[in-house]
Amino acid sequence: MSDYEFGICPYNADHRIMLFRMPKHIVKCEKNYRGPPLKICKYNATHRVLDMEEHLKECAYYRRYVNNQNVQIALTTRIPPMQEDGHDVSTPL
Ligand SMILES: [Zn+2]
Ligand SMILES: [Zn+2]
């Protein structure tokens, strides 16, 4: 049993890299990479993919980001709206 999680190097599927070493490995591997340019995921720099839209469908970091955004929205909408025309527009509970 290993204590470490492994990931597959985006530049060479033969490389199985410990996740905590992945950022360094990717920088090194990128220099030797000769394939089509990969896009860097905004939500995790170790995610390098050809098709970002496809990737975001399965990117756990993106999902986490979106969930955080939703939490933010949920929190801000709890604040009652401003009274603009004299009567309270917030729904009484
Ligand atoms: Zn590699
Ligand atoms: Zn990603």
Image: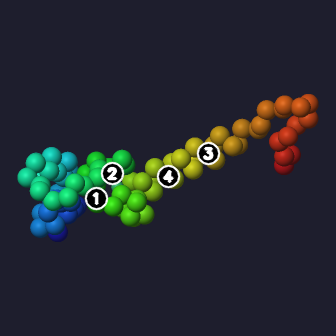
Instruction: Determine if the C-beta at disc 4 is less than 8 A from ligand 2.
Output: no
**Residue 83 image point, x, y percent:** 84, 32
- What kind of residue is marked 4? Val
Q: Earlier in the sequence, mark 3 or mark 4?
A: 4
Q: Residue at x 72, y 38 (%)?
A: 79
Q: Quadrant of the N terminus?
A: bottom left
| Residue picked out by circle 1 | 49
Q: Quadrant of residue 10?
A: bottom left
Q: Is residue 16 visible?
A: no
Q: Which mark is residue 41?
A: 2
Q: Earlier in the sequence, mark 1 or mark 3?
A: 1
**Residue 5 image point, x, y percent:** 22, 61
Q: How many marks?
A: 4
At mark 2, the secondary structure is loop
Q: Give the CA separation, mark 4 to mark 1.
A: 19 Å
Q: Earlier in the sequence, mark 2 or mark 1?
A: 2
Q: Is residue 9 visible?
A: yes
Q: Give the CA separation, mark 2 to mark 3.
A: 23 Å
- Nearer the observer: mark 1 or 3; the answer is 1
- What kind of residue is marked 2? Cys
Instruction: Determine if the C-beta at disc 1 is less than 8 A from ligand 2.
Output: yes
Q: Give the CA separation, mark 1 to mark 3.
A: 29 Å
Q: Earlier in the sequence, mark 2 or mark 3?
A: 2
- Whether tag 2 and tag 1 are in contact, CB under 8 A, the answer is yes
